[in-house]
Image (spheres, helix red, strand yellow):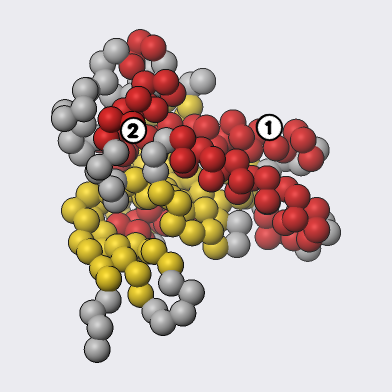
Amino acid sequence: GEFPIVDHVSSVTILFADLVGFTKASAELHPNFLVGLFLRDIFHAFDELVGKHGLEKIKTIGDAYMVVGGLDHSDGEKTNQRRRSSMSMDHATELPTHGDLGDHHHPTSIMLLARDMFHELTRINKKYNLNFSLRIGIHKGPVVAGVLGLKRFTYDVWGDSVNTASRMESNGLPNLIHLSSDMYHAVDALTNDFEFTCCGKIQVKGKGEMTTYLARPLR
């Protein structure tokens, strides 16, 4: 038989975002409005942001949205240019040049994406007179990535890092970014763009005690 197309990637950044209250709203609002208009506009806006920041959308599951950074390192210079245009000028002067990006460009890009996702949700909420919040969780670690199955082939990622990122989202708070310790230490220099708060050790299902952090965008 044929071998599946999979690859081990030593370090990626994984974001899960979830619309708080969407399931309840599904029982109250007409699907043509909630899904056909509001959710369509949200996912369209998020897709554009993912492209802007040089990241990769993996999939949507209901109202949840999953993004990964670091799967392809061949576009480092373009990614760095996007980061410079997205971040505050004070911090942008400290960014590394191409060749020094190393393992840090995709965590920063994911953080800037998360910030921009909040802004887009605010805009679209206002457009439709709604009041949804967004809960975001992010983790950084190794994954297995590839294509499996016989029909409707889709690129996906697997591993404990994916589970951890998902737990960061489900244990997070509305309108804040919940970070694992590994993710926090990759982006803790971004103090011009985010306010970081340590949550201490919390119980995380399937993981036990974890030290996590909350990030609030400053602009």
Q: Amino acid at mark 2?
A: Thr
| Residue position marked by numbered label 2 in the rendering | 79
Rendered position, 14 above or below 175: below
Left or right of 57 in this view: 174:
right
The residue under the point 41% across, 82% down is 150
Residue 18 placed where, x, y %? 55, 51
- Secondary structure of the residue carrying tag 1 is helix
Rendered position, 37 above or below 52: below
Identify the image quadrant of residue 89. Answer: top left
Left or right of 20 in this view: 196:
left
Q: Which mark is residue 114?
A: none
Rendered position, 82 above or below 35: above
Q: Nearer the viewer, residue 131 or 60?
A: 60
The residue under the point 42% across, 35% down is 53
- Secondary structure of the residue carrying tag 2 is helix
Left or right of 165 in this view: 94:
left
Q: Amino acid at mark 1?
A: Arg
Nearer the viewer's eye, disc 2 or disc 1?
2
| Residue position marked by numbered label 1 in the rendering | 123
Distance from the alpha carbon under mark 2 to that under mark 1: 25 Å
Categorize mark 1 by other alpha carbons within 10 Å: few (<14), some (14-19), many (20+).
few
Question: Would you say the residues marked 2 and 1 are in contact, meaning their CB atoms lie under 8 Å apart?
Answer: no
Q: Is residue 19 visible?
A: yes
Q: Is residue 181 visible?
A: no
Q: Nearer the viewer, residue 72 or 190?
A: 72
The residue under the point 75% across, 55% down is 36
Residue 38 placed where, x, y %? 72, 48
